[in-house]
Image (cartoon, rainbow, N blue to C red):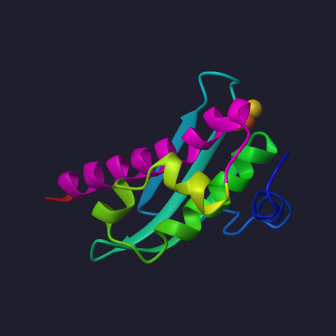
Amino acid sequence: MYSEKVMDHFAHPRNVGEIENANAVGLVGNAKCGDIMKIYMDIQDNIIKDVKFKTFGCGAAIATSSMATEMVKGKTVEEALELTNKAVMEALDGLPAEKIHCSVLAEEAIRDAIEDYRKRQNEQQ
Ligand code: FES
């Protein structure tokens, strides 16, 4: 039912944890199931230098969070905003239809963190 890549990212999620002194933090909940994801980013000169996450959710949410963090690491803020849950699912070789809503969590958490980053930037000016 799950692809090998999904199982791999679920069993060995990349970038799990927190970043102390993160300058962007996103927190989102999944309206469908109530699961949540928190994401931390260290953004320097518009580049996402480091990213870590904690997902309190199902295996598909953990696998998509893991893959999404891998896909935005080293990218610019603008590039990260273009990441879609569809692209994350494709990178994982797909998800079962009833699990597609789980992949939205990572996309939304990344957007929420970047919004937080931009808010903090504006406050500094
Ligand atoms: Fe909640 Fe998958 S069932 S994120």
Locate residue 123, reporting x and y percent.
21, 51
Location of residue 78 (image quadrant):
bottom left
Do we see residue 100 in this rendering? yes
Name the one closer to the observer, 46 or 68: 68
Give the residues in magenta: 94-123
Give the left or right position of residue 71, taking residue 33 as reference.
left
Locate residue 47, reporting x and y percent.
34, 74
Q: Residue at x 65, y 53 (%)?
A: 64
Q: Locate the C terminus by quadrant.
A: bottom left
Locate residue 118, reporting x and y percent.
27, 53
Location of residue 74 (image quadrant):
bottom left
Image quarter for ligand 1 equals top right
Residue 76 vertical position relative to residue 115 in the rendered view, above or below? below
Residue 56 vertical position relative to residue 62 in the rendered view, above or below? above
Majority secondary structure of the magenta segment?
helix
Do we see residue 51 in this rendering? no
Residue 6 vertical position relative to residue 105 in the rendered view, above or below? below
Asked if the stretch drawn in magenta spans residue 25, the answer is: no
Name the one closer to the observer, 89 or 44: 89
Q: Locate the N terminus by quadrant.
A: top right
Count of numbered badges drawn on the protein: 0
List the single residue furthest toward the left: 125
Give the left or right position of residue 41, taking residue 102 as reference.
left
Location of residue 77 (image quadrant):
bottom left
Q: Residue at x 74, y 46 (%)?
A: 60
